[in-house]
Image: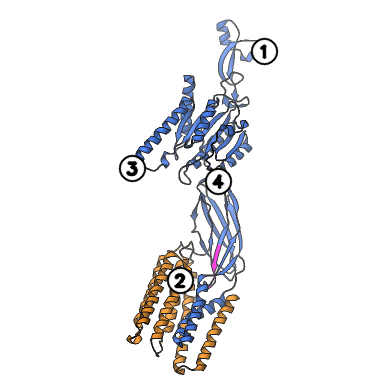
Amino acid sequence: MTWAPTPRLLAYPWLVAALLVAAIAAGRPELAAAAAPLTVLLLVGLAMSRRPRPLRSRISVSPQRVVEGDTVTVTAEIALPAELEVVEVGLPLPSGFQLLGPANPAAVRRDHGAAHSLVFTVRPVRWGAFSLGDLHVRGYDDFRLRRFEMRLPGEMAVRVYPRSDRLRTLIRPARAHVYAGSRVAAQKGEGIEFADVRPYVTGDRIRSVNWRASARRGDLWVNQRHPERNVDVVLLLDTFTHLGPTGASTLEQMVRGAASLASAWLRDRDRVGVIGFGGTLRWLEVGGGTRHAYQLVDALLDTQVVFSYAWKGIDLIPVRLLPPHALIVGVTPLLDQRVVTALLDLRGRGFDLAVIELSPTPHVEEAGSETEALAQRVWLLDREVMRSRFLRAGAAVVSWSEGDTLEPVVAEVELWRRRARLRGH
Amino acid sequence: MASARAASRPLIPGALSVALAAGLAATVALRASFGGERTLMIVVAVVAGAVGVIVVAGAVAAGWSTSIGWGIGLLAAEYAVCVLGEGSGIDLAAPLVGALLVITAEVAYTSCDWRRPHAVNAAAELRRWLRLAGVVAFGALIGLGALALTSVAGGESPAGLVVGGGCAVALVALVVVLHRQ
């Protein structure tokens, strides 16, 4: 708590003293008379000025776990001491929060000892972990000669989860895991989906016999089916660089997309891991289940771009993070050559790869001159060449623009992969 | 919750304080006669007044509340120079000048306060200004009374000087004591 003089109290006594000294030195009573209003103001103001007792307050933040775009209320019960008639109460907002009401700061007036309830309504526009709830209070004495300031601690951690699309289509990995799941595997075995028929061998179950085929061929034939397996998916997030304003940058788009994909796969009992590939390497190993889903979202909340000049390749990624047969989904604006090289290296080592390109073009300023227009065209052509390298390597690349839904992008990736399978890529 | 309204714009008090400062400086300079011979004092008074107005305007425009005191001080200096050049007559408008100096300073400080995020309670603000006006008017009346007393007592005397000096020292000491409390 601070109780400090305002600029008034720092200036007025000197003015009074100067006028009185001048009056005595020059023998002019007018100067003393001119100093009289200021002198009376100082005397009365200082006589009435009392150091206030600390405020009584109770602050609550609710809810503490929200999704982007929801509202959070910060409620403060404040009781002013008798020394303060009115105070300004301000709520410092972290970047990524929007105030919906009331005005910040707000004025609170004393009401004979009764506590005032002040409710700030804020909306998070960006995912992340934030501290919210500290209030700053400022008040003055009756003549604003002294200022009272204090912090009302009410800080609480608010976790804002990314808004995620509910996906009906998902990218089907080329190969499934050995554990049971919801994906129809390409292999043949015990399952529901019909795959083929083959001649009966000793040990086959009678219920597997295809009686129609057996009658036609005069020998016992049994049905083969595709087993339902789960898949391993690794989301490789490019955290080298990002483009765009807060709330709509490629980084935020990337985390929203990753959250949507991860939650869809986890809902289908698949195993999902995440690697933040950038200036620093962060990861969460593949796993499944409810607990892992929470861990994954928390890991995504900590995603941030760390700038680095150092060259980084896939040799930095621990081997256990990339299980064999895992589908690797690169979510990247394809702006950094290190990510492009790493993804192509992974494809070269036989990993099943798909790339969701976070389109940086909406964030690029319009060309102002012919030279800039030419440079932009060259840049766009360069990106086309980069995409064609992925396609030639057998990895789907589909562009996703901020504001569009993820569903058609995933569907397009899946369509490309199905066509590639038919072509025998 | 008490009634609160959106942050007020500092433009109105800022413009008002500059207008008050300019009006005060011009009036003081125009009222001074100087007997037609004290050219240097006229120049000093006008320069002090003009610089004071500029300092107040600059402080209000930039939000430097600590500079307002200097501007008000220069305006007071202009008045002091004018009074010194006046000769023997007593200027009965001195308390009014003092009151206007306080009002100008308060309006300028308010403008600076409103430049940063703030909240205003209209009723409390009105009460503050009424209180301020009352105190300043009371101070002006005391100043007027002191002037009347001086004119009745007439002339300069060592005893009057001692009493006046003692009163001034006592006042400043009282301010310091209250400040320290």
**Which is nearer the eye, B128 or A367?**
A367
Q: Is residue B60 above or below residue A373?
A: below
Q: How many marks?
A: 4
Callout 3: residue from which chain? A
Residue bearing the label numbered 3: A369
Q: Amino acid at mark 3?
A: Ser
Q: Classify mark 1: residues with Cα within 10 Å, few (<14), some (14-19) or many (20+).
A: few
Q: Amino acid at mark 2?
A: Ile
Mark in the foreground, 4 or 2: 2
Circles 3 and 2 on the same subunit: no
How far apart, in angstroms, are the residues tagged by discs 4 and 2? Answer: 44 Å
Disc assigned to residue A203? 1
The stretch of residues the image draws in magenta is A137-143
Q: Which chain is orange?
A: B
Residue bearing the label numbered 4: A128
Mark in the foreground, 4 or 3: 3
Residue bearing the label numbered 2: B68
Q: Is residue A176 above or below residue B37?
A: above
Mark 4 touches mark 1? (CB < 8 Å): no
Q: Amino acid at mark 1?
A: Gly
In the rendered image, which quarter contains the C terminus of chain B?
bottom right
In the image, residue A261 lies in the stretch drawn in magenta: no
